[in-house]
Image (tube, helix red, strand yellow):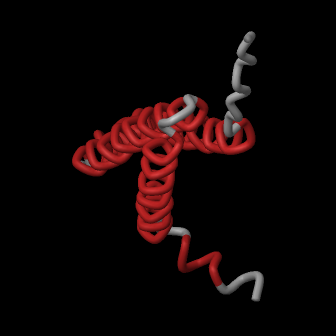
Amino acid sequence: MQTQPIAVKKATAGFIISLIAGIIILINGLLMFALTSVVAGIGIGAGLIDVGAAVALYGAIGLLFAIIVIVGAILIYIPGKEILGGILVLIFSIVSIIIGRFLHRLNPWHRRWRFRYR
């Protein structure tokens, strides 16, 4: 009697969406590091060096979250690890959104432009 191999379904759509989310978070973290050099350059003349360090910290946190989301996306693709990968992607994506929203609130132009388009 010959046995047929069982076809294992992989979560391809979840993998792709989670991978795209991780790449977007990674780009955001890299842009924060680029912004650090600009803020540090301006801050040296204005005495705001600590602001550049804070932006660098948020960039580092963003890069860490991006790596965790990408690892979670890879775990989603591995059969049997879908739940763990989904939990990692969900938690760290939501925390990344919350931190990004907090940074948006720190933007000095936020209050000026907020009511322009209403």
Count every numbered label the image shows and give the total: 0
- Residue at the image position 37 percent from the left and 37 percent from the top: 64
Where is residue 65, by image quadrant? top left
Q: Picture quarter containing residue 22?
A: top right
Task: Pick the residue in front: 30 or 8.
Answer: 8
Across and down, in percent, residue 118 comes to: 76, 89
82 vs 117, left or right, is: left
Residue 54, position as x, y percentages in the image? 28, 49
In depth, the one of 33 and 5 nearer the eye is: 5
Residue farthest toward the front in the current orientation of the protein: 1
x, y percentage for residue 17? 69, 44
Quadrant (top left, top right, bottom left, bottom right) of the N terminus: top right
Nearer to the camera, 71 or 95? 71
Q: Residue at x 55, y 29 (%)?
A: 78
65 lies above or below 5 = below
In the rendered structure, the answer to whether residue 63 lies left or right of residue 10 reads left
Name the residue at 48% across, 48% down. Answer: 83
Residue beneath the point at 72% across and 82% down: 116
Question: In the image, residue 23 lies at what x, y percent?
Answer: 60, 35
